Amino acid sequence: MTSHEVVQQGESHEHNTLARASLDNCVKCTICETQCPVSRVTPLFTGPKFVGPQAERFRNGESVDKSLDYCSSCGICTQACPQGVKIAEINTVARAVMKEDHMPVRDRLIVQTTLMGRFMTPFAPVANMALKNKPVRKIMQAVVGVAEDAPMPPAQMQSFEGWLKRRPRPKTQPTREPIVFFHGCAGGYFEVETSKKTVEVLEHLGYEVLVPKQGCCGLAQQSNGLFAGARRSVNALVDALLSAGKGLTIVSSSGSCTGMLKHEAHEILGMDDPRLMEVGSRIRETSEFLLELLDEGILTPDMLSPIEATIPYHQPCQVKSQAMGTPAVTVMEAIPGVKVVESGQPCCGIAGTYGLKKEKYEIAKAVGQPVFDMVKETNPDLGTCDTETCRWQIQKHSGVRMVHPVELLHQSLGLSNDLKV
């Protein structure tokens, strides 16, 4: 263990002690229980209050309630708590402790998103064929524990990095300051189109977009209790993003990864490194950044061509937790003719890797069913959502094509015409 990791372990312990202290603010009002999307669909999870503030008082280094593993870490409980109790944070740390001595091999494998992308991209047609093959998926479920019907990321013929190297140089010179683009693992290998269109929109608006070589944000590792690995991933990513230049705005179309750098690495992993704090203060989810441009008059409605459509939109729980409001709705409705209908639901159920696990697949599906129904009823052809895994989950169970809101703006700016609206 490096000296840096020793310091961070000390920071983590101190920070978790502070989060744990918040449990004394719990007045047992049960608001968190009424808002929990998991406990409302299964008795296997006894609820955030019971396994959180209540159980925490009896923990002494080990869990007193194994149902804690059914918490999806959506964070809705913390957002709903009127007393400021860090329920989700307490639960996430407690689950990591619970899994220390019996970490499933599956939970170590499914967090290797970058490795998976590097392996699948050169063999995309074969990989996609295998992932659609029922016998192969049944074997995966039996051997690895990944549900045979769980949504899997589609392999692409070209990575985002490959596209950047081979694309023609922008025809116009930038007229605005440089900004940094953080694509995330999924945006690098699986949601390549979202990353490409984000860069093209930003360049169209006059920005020079810098894309430093970058790795994983560590969110999947954190969610599965692999805190040490998650901290290493965060440290490496922070270094990479800061290497592009000092004081630059960072934009990302991966809403969950943005939240990891803004607050989760600090609040759950206990990382207080000034470099992380700088990145966290400078990073913006794409829709959040575009709303700022609308407010500043850099992006204006008269730049946008009409799109006559009613668009369903689901804001993922990990974007809700960033307390940014709903910038995607405002940005999309700046397009003449667009009407946005929000899902009004807390979670689609996937919660990163939660819904991929065979014992949690049906729970995740039940959690997201109201979202699937709403999307399908609102527009059977197209829906929008800010994070990759949530898009895969909703598209899988609704049959509706799901895209990041930036893709709608990309088409309205005349940069593409591939959305069926």
Image (cartoon, grey):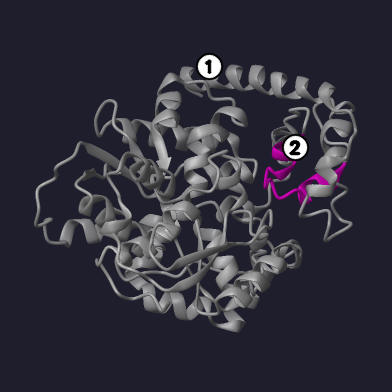
Instruction: Please tell me in which quadrant of the rendered image residue 421 appears.
Output: bottom left
Does 300 appear above or below 123? above
Instruction: Please tell me in which quadrant of the rendered image residue 61 appears.
Output: top right
Marks 2/1: CA distance? 23 Å
Kind of residue at badge 2: Asn
- Kindly identify which residue carries mark 1: 7
Percent coordinates x, y for residue 183 in the rendering: 37, 50
Residue 204 in view in this figure = yes
Percent coordinates x, y for residue 361 in the rendering: 71, 65
Instruction: Please tell me in which quadrant of the rendered image residue 288 appears.
Output: top left
Q: Earlier in the sequence, mark 2 or mark 1?
A: 1
Instruction: Determine which of the numbered discs, if any, sits on residue 21 in the image.
Output: none
Question: Foreground residue, 362 or 391?
Answer: 391
User: Please, what secondary structure does the residue beneath circle 2 have?
Assistant: helix
Does 241 appear above or below 43? above
Is residue 82 toward the left or the right of residue 58 in the image? left
Tell me the magenta residue range. 65-81
Question: Foreground residue, 98 or 76?
Answer: 76
Kind of residue at badge 1: Val
Percent coordinates x, y for residue 55 in the rendering: 88, 33
Residue at the spot 83% in from the left edge and 53% down from the top edge: 39
- Kindly identify which residue carries mark 2: 91
Percent coordinates x, y for residue 117 in the rendering: 41, 60
